[in-house]
Image: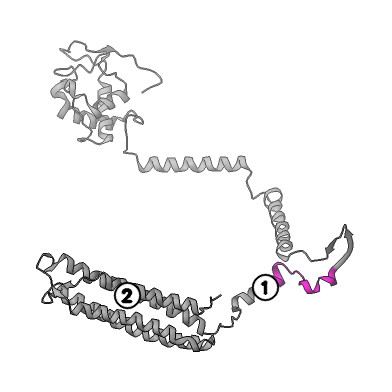
Protein backbone atom coordinates (compact mmCIF):
# COMPACT_ATOMS: atom_id res chain seq x y z
CA UNK A 1 0.00 0.00 0.00
CA UNK A 2 1.53 3.34 -1.05
CA UNK A 3 1.01 6.64 0.75
CA UNK A 4 -0.16 9.57 -1.41
CA UNK A 5 2.19 12.52 -1.53
CA UNK A 6 -0.04 15.58 -1.25
CA UNK A 7 1.06 19.21 -1.44
CA UNK A 8 2.00 19.64 2.26
CA UNK A 9 4.13 16.49 2.07
CA UNK A 10 5.97 17.74 -0.99
CA UNK A 11 6.52 21.16 0.60
CA UNK A 12 7.96 19.46 3.68
CA UNK A 13 10.14 17.33 1.42
CA UNK A 14 11.80 20.27 -0.28
CA UNK A 15 12.03 22.27 2.90
CA UNK A 16 14.00 19.36 4.40
CA UNK A 17 16.38 19.45 1.45
CA UNK A 18 16.74 23.18 1.84
CA UNK A 19 17.66 22.82 5.52
CA UNK A 20 20.27 20.16 4.69
CA UNK A 21 22.03 22.33 2.16
CA UNK A 22 21.75 25.40 4.38
CA UNK A 23 23.35 23.48 7.26
CA UNK A 24 26.20 22.40 5.04
CA UNK A 25 26.79 25.98 3.95
CA UNK A 26 26.48 27.36 7.48
CA UNK A 27 29.12 24.95 8.70
CA UNK A 28 31.60 26.31 6.16
CA UNK A 29 34.05 28.88 7.49
CA UNK A 30 35.57 31.45 5.19
CA UNK A 31 38.82 29.59 4.78
CA UNK A 32 40.07 26.31 3.31
CA UNK A 33 43.49 24.76 3.15
CA UNK A 34 45.90 25.64 0.40
CA UNK A 35 44.93 24.13 -2.96
CA UNK A 36 48.53 23.15 -3.66
CA UNK A 37 48.03 20.18 -1.31
CA UNK A 38 47.15 16.90 -3.09
CA UNK A 39 44.67 15.73 -0.44
CA UNK A 40 42.90 19.09 -0.47
CA UNK A 41 42.65 19.03 -4.27
CA UNK A 42 41.18 15.50 -4.25
CA UNK A 43 38.60 16.40 -1.58
CA UNK A 44 37.57 19.58 -3.44
CA UNK A 45 37.14 17.59 -6.68
CA UNK A 46 34.99 15.04 -4.85
CA UNK A 47 32.88 17.84 -3.39
CA UNK A 48 32.32 19.36 -6.85
CA UNK A 49 31.43 15.96 -8.37
CA UNK A 50 28.91 15.28 -5.62
CA UNK A 51 27.44 18.76 -6.08
CA UNK A 52 27.02 18.01 -9.81
CA UNK A 53 25.33 14.67 -8.94
CA UNK A 54 22.96 16.49 -6.59
CA UNK A 55 22.13 18.99 -9.32
CA UNK A 56 21.36 16.19 -11.82
CA UNK A 57 19.22 14.28 -9.34
CA UNK A 58 17.44 17.55 -8.56
CA UNK A 59 16.48 17.89 -12.20
CA UNK A 60 15.04 14.38 -12.15
CA UNK A 61 13.15 15.20 -8.96
CA UNK A 62 11.71 18.36 -10.53
CA UNK A 63 10.49 16.42 -13.57
CA UNK A 64 8.88 13.70 -11.48
CA UNK A 65 7.25 16.32 -9.26
CA UNK A 66 5.66 17.97 -12.28
CA UNK A 67 4.23 14.64 -13.42
CA UNK A 68 2.89 13.92 -9.95
CA UNK A 69 1.26 17.34 -9.72
CA UNK A 70 -0.45 16.78 -13.06
CA UNK A 71 -1.62 13.36 -11.93
CA UNK A 72 -3.06 14.73 -8.68
CA UNK A 73 -4.60 17.76 -10.46
CA UNK A 74 -2.51 20.28 -8.58
CA UNK A 75 -0.60 21.62 -11.54
CA UNK A 76 -1.68 25.19 -10.77
CA UNK A 77 0.43 25.18 -7.61
CA UNK A 78 3.61 23.75 -9.10
CA UNK A 79 5.24 27.18 -9.14
CA UNK A 80 5.43 27.27 -5.34
CA UNK A 81 7.10 23.87 -5.17
CA UNK A 82 9.50 24.66 -8.00
CA UNK A 83 10.47 27.85 -6.21
CA UNK A 84 11.44 25.86 -3.15
CA UNK A 85 13.44 23.44 -5.33
CA UNK A 86 15.25 26.29 -7.05
CA UNK A 87 16.03 27.90 -3.71
CA UNK A 88 17.39 24.62 -2.35
CA UNK A 89 19.72 24.09 -5.29
CA UNK A 90 20.75 27.71 -5.35
CA UNK A 91 21.93 27.12 -1.77
CA UNK A 92 23.97 24.16 -3.06
CA UNK A 93 25.46 26.24 -5.84
CA UNK A 94 26.38 29.06 -3.50
CA UNK A 95 27.89 26.51 -1.13
CA UNK A 96 30.10 25.10 -3.89
CA UNK A 97 31.08 28.61 -4.95
CA UNK A 98 32.00 29.49 -1.36
CA UNK A 99 34.52 26.68 -1.36
CA UNK A 100 36.45 28.14 -4.26
CA UNK A 101 36.36 31.74 -3.01
CA UNK A 102 37.76 31.14 0.46
CA UNK A 103 41.20 32.23 1.59
CA UNK A 104 44.14 30.02 2.49
CA UNK A 105 44.53 29.16 6.17
CA UNK A 106 47.84 29.35 7.98
CA UNK A 107 49.80 26.12 7.89
CA UNK A 108 49.03 23.97 10.90
CA UNK A 109 49.92 20.58 9.43
CA UNK A 110 47.93 17.64 10.72
CA UNK A 111 46.53 15.64 7.79
CA UNK A 112 49.06 14.98 5.03
CA UNK A 113 49.85 18.69 4.68
CA UNK A 114 46.32 19.93 5.50
CA UNK A 115 45.52 21.85 8.64
CA UNK A 116 42.89 20.60 11.08
CA UNK A 117 40.20 23.15 10.19
CA UNK A 118 40.54 22.76 6.43
CA UNK A 119 40.42 18.97 6.51
CA UNK A 120 37.27 18.75 8.61
CA UNK A 121 35.67 21.56 6.58
CA UNK A 122 35.94 19.58 3.36
CA UNK A 123 35.08 16.30 5.09
CA UNK A 124 31.86 17.79 6.53
CA UNK A 125 30.91 19.17 3.10
CA UNK A 126 31.38 15.73 1.47
CA UNK A 127 29.41 14.00 4.22
CA UNK A 128 26.51 16.44 3.92
CA UNK A 129 26.45 15.97 0.15
CA UNK A 130 26.21 12.20 0.61
CA UNK A 131 23.31 12.71 3.03
CA UNK A 132 21.59 14.99 0.52
CA UNK A 133 21.97 12.37 -2.22
CA UNK A 134 20.36 9.73 0.01
CA UNK A 135 17.44 12.04 0.78
CA UNK A 136 16.87 12.84 -2.90
CA UNK A 137 16.99 9.13 -3.81
CA UNK A 138 14.38 8.43 -1.16
CA UNK A 139 12.06 11.16 -2.48
CA UNK A 140 12.53 10.08 -6.10
CA UNK A 141 11.60 6.54 -5.15
CA UNK A 142 8.49 7.73 -3.31
CA UNK A 143 7.30 9.78 -6.29
CA UNK A 144 7.96 6.91 -8.71
CA UNK A 145 5.80 4.64 -6.57
CA UNK A 146 2.98 7.15 -6.90
CA UNK A 147 3.38 7.53 -10.65
CA UNK A 148 3.72 3.84 -11.57
CA UNK A 149 0.33 2.08 -11.52
CA UNK A 150 0.00 -0.88 -9.17
CA UNK A 151 0.79 -4.16 -10.85
CA UNK A 152 -1.90 -6.79 -11.07
CA UNK A 153 -0.56 -9.64 -9.00
CA UNK A 154 -1.00 -13.03 -10.63
CA UNK A 155 -1.08 -16.08 -8.39
CA UNK A 156 2.14 -18.00 -8.48
CA UNK A 157 2.09 -21.27 -10.42
CA UNK A 158 3.35 -23.22 -7.40
CA UNK A 159 0.76 -21.61 -5.13
CA UNK A 160 -2.06 -22.45 -7.54
CA UNK A 161 -0.82 -26.03 -7.84
CA UNK A 162 -0.65 -26.39 -4.05
CA UNK A 163 -4.17 -24.97 -3.68
CA UNK A 164 -5.56 -27.60 -6.05
CA UNK A 165 -3.60 -30.37 -4.34
CA UNK A 166 -4.79 -29.22 -0.92
CA UNK A 167 -8.43 -29.34 -1.95
CA UNK A 168 -8.11 -32.81 -3.47
CA UNK A 169 -5.72 -34.58 -1.11
CA UNK A 170 -5.27 -32.80 2.21
CA UNK A 171 -8.53 -31.16 3.25
CA UNK A 172 -11.17 -31.79 0.56
CA UNK A 173 -13.44 -29.33 2.33
CA UNK A 174 -16.49 -27.97 0.55
CA UNK A 175 -16.39 -24.26 -0.23
CA UNK A 176 -18.53 -21.87 1.81
CA UNK A 177 -20.80 -21.25 -1.16
CA UNK A 178 -21.73 -24.95 -1.35
CA UNK A 179 -22.07 -25.70 2.37
CA UNK A 180 -25.85 -25.67 2.13
CA UNK A 181 -25.69 -28.86 0.05
CA UNK A 182 -24.01 -30.85 2.83
CA UNK A 183 -25.80 -29.32 5.81
CA UNK A 184 -27.36 -32.02 8.02
CA UNK A 185 -30.71 -31.83 9.73
CA UNK A 186 -29.12 -31.92 13.17
CA UNK A 187 -29.67 -28.75 15.12
CA UNK A 188 -28.37 -28.39 18.68
CA UNK A 189 -29.26 -25.02 20.20
CA UNK A 190 -28.72 -23.35 16.85
CA UNK A 191 -25.48 -25.23 16.14
CA UNK A 192 -25.67 -27.11 12.85
CA UNK A 193 -23.42 -29.83 11.44
CA UNK A 194 -21.79 -30.21 8.04
CA UNK A 195 -21.31 -33.60 6.42
CA UNK A 196 -17.71 -32.91 5.36
CA UNK A 197 -15.50 -35.85 4.40
CA UNK A 198 -12.57 -36.82 6.59
CA UNK A 199 -9.35 -35.06 5.62
CA UNK A 200 -7.55 -37.38 3.20
CA UNK A 201 -4.22 -37.00 5.02
CA UNK A 202 -5.82 -38.30 8.22
CA UNK A 203 -7.61 -41.16 6.49
CA UNK A 204 -4.55 -42.33 4.57
CA UNK A 205 -2.41 -41.96 7.70
CA UNK A 206 -4.82 -44.30 9.49
CA UNK A 207 -4.52 -46.83 6.65
CA UNK A 208 -0.70 -46.67 6.96
CA UNK A 209 -0.86 -47.44 10.70
CA UNK A 210 -2.91 -50.54 9.93
CA UNK A 211 -0.29 -51.75 7.43
CA UNK A 212 2.54 -51.08 9.94
CA UNK A 213 0.67 -52.98 12.64
CA UNK A 214 0.32 -56.03 10.38
CA UNK A 215 4.03 -55.97 9.52
CA UNK A 216 4.93 -55.65 13.22
CA UNK A 217 2.71 -58.59 14.12
CA UNK A 218 4.24 -60.82 11.45
CA UNK A 219 7.83 -59.81 12.28
CA UNK A 220 7.70 -60.24 16.06
CA UNK A 221 4.93 -62.76 16.75
CA UNK A 222 4.54 -64.93 13.65
CA UNK A 223 7.84 -65.21 11.77
CA UNK A 224 10.03 -64.47 14.82
CA UNK A 225 12.57 -62.24 13.01
CA UNK A 226 12.30 -59.39 15.53
CA UNK A 227 14.01 -59.34 18.93
CA UNK A 228 12.36 -58.50 22.21
CA UNK A 229 14.23 -56.16 24.65
CA UNK A 230 15.97 -59.06 26.45
CA UNK A 231 17.21 -60.53 23.19
CA UNK A 232 18.39 -57.13 21.99
CA UNK A 233 20.36 -56.69 25.23
CA UNK A 234 22.05 -60.07 24.89
CA UNK A 235 22.91 -59.32 21.28
CA UNK A 236 24.50 -55.99 22.24
CA UNK A 237 26.53 -57.69 24.99
CA UNK A 238 27.88 -60.22 22.48
CA UNK A 239 28.87 -57.44 20.10
CA UNK A 240 30.62 -55.58 22.93
CA UNK A 241 32.62 -58.68 23.88
CA UNK A 242 33.67 -59.16 20.26
CA UNK A 243 34.76 -55.51 20.08
CA UNK A 244 36.76 -55.86 23.31
CA UNK A 245 38.50 -59.00 22.03
CA UNK A 246 39.35 -57.27 18.77
CA UNK A 247 40.69 -54.25 20.65
CA UNK A 248 42.78 -56.44 22.94
CA UNK A 249 44.26 -58.26 19.93
CA UNK A 250 45.20 -54.97 18.28
CA UNK A 251 46.68 -53.54 21.49
CA UNK A 252 48.55 -56.53 22.87
CA UNK A 253 51.68 -54.44 23.51
CA UNK A 254 49.83 -51.71 25.41
CA UNK A 255 50.52 -53.03 28.89
CA UNK A 256 50.43 -51.10 32.14
CA UNK A 257 50.24 -51.84 35.86
CA UNK A 258 46.47 -52.39 35.63
CA UNK A 259 46.49 -55.19 33.04
CA UNK A 260 49.94 -56.77 33.42
CA UNK A 261 50.14 -60.54 33.45
CA UNK A 262 53.00 -62.86 34.40
CA UNK A 263 55.21 -63.15 31.31
CA UNK A 264 56.10 -66.44 29.65
CA UNK A 265 59.52 -68.09 30.05
CA UNK A 266 60.82 -66.61 26.81
CA UNK A 267 59.62 -63.15 27.85
CA UNK A 268 61.24 -63.56 31.30
CA UNK A 269 64.55 -64.31 29.56
CA UNK A 270 64.23 -61.00 27.71
CA UNK A 271 63.60 -59.29 31.05
CA UNK A 272 66.74 -60.91 32.43
CA UNK A 273 68.77 -59.39 29.57
CA UNK A 274 67.51 -55.94 30.50
CA UNK A 275 68.24 -56.55 34.20
CA UNK A 276 71.83 -57.74 33.60
CA UNK A 277 72.54 -54.78 31.31
CA UNK A 278 71.04 -51.95 33.38
CA UNK A 279 69.61 -52.89 36.79
CA UNK A 280 72.50 -54.91 38.23
CA UNK A 281 74.57 -51.79 38.93
CA UNK A 282 72.20 -50.91 41.81
CA UNK A 283 70.61 -54.26 42.68
CA UNK A 284 73.47 -56.69 41.99
CA UNK A 285 73.80 -59.24 39.21
CA UNK A 286 71.75 -61.81 41.15
CA UNK A 287 69.38 -59.29 42.76
CA UNK A 288 71.25 -59.47 46.08
CA UNK A 289 71.23 -55.68 46.41
CA UNK A 290 73.88 -52.97 46.39
CA UNK A 291 73.09 -49.31 46.24
CA UNK A 292 69.51 -50.46 45.76
CA UNK A 293 67.57 -52.90 47.96
CA UNK A 294 67.72 -56.70 47.92
CA UNK A 295 65.16 -58.12 45.47
CA UNK A 296 65.28 -61.74 46.65
CA UNK A 297 63.80 -61.55 50.15
CA UNK A 298 60.28 -60.87 51.41
CA UNK A 299 60.91 -57.25 52.36
CA UNK A 300 59.86 -54.49 49.98
CA UNK A 301 59.96 -50.73 50.29
CA UNK A 302 57.12 -50.21 47.80
CA UNK A 303 55.38 -53.60 47.98
CA UNK A 304 56.27 -56.61 45.90
CA UNK A 305 53.34 -57.72 43.74
CA UNK A 306 53.80 -57.90 39.97
CA UNK A 307 51.67 -54.77 39.58
CA UNK A 308 53.69 -52.90 42.23
CA UNK A 309 57.05 -53.87 40.69
CA UNK A 310 55.85 -52.74 37.26
CA UNK A 311 54.67 -49.44 38.77
CA UNK A 312 58.00 -48.88 40.55
CA UNK A 313 60.00 -49.45 37.34
CA UNK A 314 57.65 -47.27 35.33
CA UNK A 315 57.46 -44.10 37.48
CA UNK A 316 60.60 -44.55 39.63
CA UNK A 317 61.34 -42.91 42.98
CA UNK A 318 63.89 -40.13 42.31
CA UNK A 319 64.01 -39.15 45.98
CA UNK A 320 65.45 -42.61 46.74
CA UNK A 321 67.70 -42.84 43.69
CA UNK A 322 65.31 -44.87 41.50
CA UNK A 323 64.76 -43.21 38.12
CA UNK A 324 61.74 -43.61 35.87
CA UNK A 325 62.29 -46.04 32.98
CA UNK A 326 59.01 -45.28 31.20
CA UNK A 327 60.76 -43.29 28.46
CA UNK A 328 63.51 -45.89 27.96
CA UNK A 329 61.43 -49.05 27.59
CA UNK A 330 58.01 -49.96 26.24
CA UNK A 331 55.22 -51.29 28.42
CA UNK A 332 55.88 -54.82 27.22
CA UNK A 333 59.60 -54.61 28.02
CA UNK A 334 58.86 -53.26 31.51
CA UNK A 335 56.42 -56.14 32.06
CA UNK A 336 59.14 -58.63 31.04
CA UNK A 337 61.59 -57.00 33.46
CA UNK A 338 59.01 -57.01 36.27
CA UNK A 339 58.33 -60.69 35.58
CA UNK A 340 62.04 -61.55 35.86
CA UNK A 341 62.40 -59.61 39.14
CA UNK A 342 59.38 -61.52 40.47
CA UNK A 343 61.22 -64.81 39.83
CA UNK A 344 64.18 -63.71 42.00
CA UNK A 345 62.21 -64.14 45.22
CA UNK A 346 63.70 -66.89 47.43
CA UNK A 347 66.80 -67.51 45.27
CA UNK A 348 69.11 -66.79 48.26
CA UNK A 349 72.16 -65.38 46.43
CA UNK A 350 75.50 -65.05 48.29
CA UNK A 351 76.19 -61.88 50.29
CA UNK A 352 72.61 -60.53 50.31
CA UNK A 353 72.00 -57.02 51.48
CA UNK A 354 70.22 -56.45 54.79
CA UNK A 355 66.45 -56.37 54.41
CA UNK A 356 64.84 -53.01 53.82
CA UNK A 357 61.22 -51.94 54.03
CA UNK A 358 58.32 -54.05 55.27
CA UNK A 359 57.66 -57.72 54.88
CA UNK A 360 55.36 -58.36 51.95
CA UNK A 361 52.81 -61.15 51.89
CA UNK A 362 51.40 -61.96 48.45
CA UNK A 363 47.65 -61.39 48.21
CA UNK A 364 46.02 -64.30 46.42
CA UNK A 365 43.53 -61.92 44.82
CA UNK A 366 46.36 -59.92 43.24
CA UNK A 367 49.18 -60.85 40.95
Q: Residue 270 location, x and y as percent?
A: 23, 32
From the viewer's perspective, tell me whether residue 173 is left or right of residue 253. Answer: right
In the rendered view, would you say 186 is above or below 327? below
Q: Residues within 10 Å of mark 2 (few under 14, many from 20)?
A: many
Q: CA distance from mark 2 to mark 1?
A: 59 Å
Task: Name the one closer to the observer, 180 or 143.
Answer: 143
Please count the marks in the image: 2
Q: Residue at x 19, y 72 (%)?
A: 30
- Residue underneath mark 2: 21
Give the side of residue 215 with respect to residue 343, left or right.
right
The stretch of residues the image draws in magenta is 165-182
**Secondary structure at numbered mark 2:** helix
Question: Could you tell me residue 149's position as x and y percent?
Answer: 54, 85
Residue at image point 44% right, 84% down: 80
Neighbour tally class for label 1: few under 14, some 14-19, many 20 plus, Cα within 10 Å: few
342 sits left or right of 290 in the view: right
Whether residue 125 is visible to the viewer of this picture, yes or no, is yes
Do labels 2 and 1 touch, CB within 8 Å?
Answer: no
The circle drawn on residue 165 is 1
Query: Which residue is drawn at the image coordinates 35% and 17% (left, top)?
Result: 362
Disc number lying in front (2 or 1):
2
In the orientation shown, which residue stands out farthest toward the left? Answer: 107
Q: Would you place residue 13 above or below residue 288 in this image? A: below
Name the outermost residue toward the right: 185
Of the 4 image quadrants, the one containing the N terminus is bottom right
Nearer the observer, 203 or 26 = 26
Quarter occupied by the C terminus: top left
Above or below, 92 against 360 in this view is below
Q: Secondary structure at mark 1?
A: helix
Does residue 126 appear in this view? no
**Residue 169 shown in magenta:** yes
- Left/right placement of residue 210 relative to residue 255 reads right
Amino acid sequence: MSTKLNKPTLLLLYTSLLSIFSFAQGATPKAVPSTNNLLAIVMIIIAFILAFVIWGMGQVLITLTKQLMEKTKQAGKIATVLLIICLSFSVTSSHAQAITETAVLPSSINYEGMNYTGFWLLASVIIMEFVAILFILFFINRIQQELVPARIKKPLLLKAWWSRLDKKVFTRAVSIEKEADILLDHDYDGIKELDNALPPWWKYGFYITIVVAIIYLLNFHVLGYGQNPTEEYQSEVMKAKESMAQYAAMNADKIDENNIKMPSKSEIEKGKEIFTSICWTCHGKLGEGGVGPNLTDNFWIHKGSLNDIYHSIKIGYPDKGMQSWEKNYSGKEISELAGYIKTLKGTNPPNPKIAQGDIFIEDSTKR
